[in-house]
Amino acid sequence: MTGSRILVAFASKHGSTREVAQAIAGTLNELGQRVECVPASSVREVAQYDGVVVGGALYTGRWHRDAMRLCKEHGREIAARPWAAFALGPKTLEDQDVASSRAQLDAALAKLELRPPDLVAVFGGVVDPTKLRFPFNRMPASDARDWPAIHAWAREANALFRQNAPLEPALR
C-alpha cells in the first residue's frame, strides 16, 4: 500500500518550529507516507493532499500569523480531510506553562471558521536570546522541545492518516 500524500506546513520565525515540522515529516515519511514539508506562507493549495499538518510558534499569546492565514485561506479544503495542528510555545514543560500555551492555541483555533483539528499538540519552545530583540534578548537560553514526544505525536498523526487513507485506485 502506498502512503497518503501529506502536507506538513510550518510557520516559524526563528527556525525551531521548522525543525519540529521536519522531524514530524521525517517520522511520517519513515512510516510510509509521502510528505511535503514547506513553509505555510508558500502553500497555494491543499486539494492534492490526503492529510494536513499545520504547525506554528506561539508569540505573545498568538499562533503564528502564517499558520492562521493558511487555515483561513484554505479552511474548506483542510477541513475536508484529516488534519492536525501543533504549536511551540512554553519555555518549560511544567504543567502550568503547557496549559497556558494550549489555551492560547485553542483560542487561535477557535477563531478559525473550520472544523477543529483531529489531533492537537503543544510542544516546548526554544529561547535563543541571540535571535531576539530587546527586552526578550535578556531572557535565558532554553530549549524545551521533547523530541520523543514529538516523534510519538507524529506516529499518532500517521495512525490518523492511515485510518482515513483513500482507497488504492484498483480498490475503488
Image: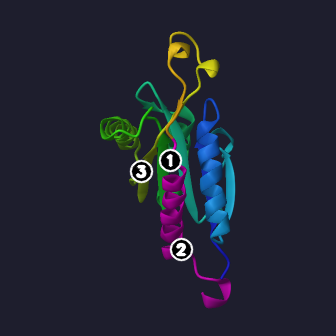
Horizontal and vertical percent position of residue 80: 49, 62
Instruction: Using the image as rendered, state which of residue 151 and residue 106 is in the foreground.
Output: 151
Instruction: Give the camera-side residue of 144 and 169.
Output: 144
Label 3 neighbourhood size at 10 Å, few (<14), some (14-19), many (20+)? some
Asked if the residues shown at circle 1 and circle 3 are in contact, with their CB atoms under 8 angstroms apart, the answer is no
Query: Which percent across, then down, holds residue 23?
Result: 63, 52
Which residue shows up at 57% across the image and 76% down it?
166
Q: Nearer the viewer, residue 115 or 130?
A: 130
Please name whichever residue, 78 or 2, is drawn nearer the observer in this view of the structure: 2
| Residue at figure coordinates x 38%, y 36% from the top left | 101
Q: Could you say which disc has been placed on residue 157 in the image?
A: none
**Nearer the observer, disc 3 or disc 2?**
2
Visible in this render: residue 46? Answer: no
Q: Is residue 67 left or right of residue 93?
A: right
Residue 84 covered by magenta stretch: no
Secondary structure of residue under mark 3 = loop
Which residues make up the magenta segment? 145-172
Using residue 30 as the reference point, say whether residue 158 is left or right of it: left
Q: Earlier in the sequence, mark 3 or mark 2?
A: 3
Q: Residue at x 42, y 52 (%)?
A: 120
The quadrant the N terminus occupies is bottom right
**Tag 1, which secondary structure?**
loop
Name the amino acid type tagged 2. Arg
Q: Quadrant of the C terminus?
A: bottom right
Q: Which residue is mark 1?
A: 146
Q: Position of residue 154 (x, y in %)?
A: 53, 60
Q: What label sits on residue 162 in the rendered view? A: 2
**In which quarter of the view is residue 47 placed?**
bottom right
In this rendering, is residue 128 above or below 8? above
**16, above or below 48, in the image:** above
Q: Nearer the viewer, mark 1 or mark 3?
A: 1
Whole-angstrom CA distance, mark 1 to mark 3, is 29 Å
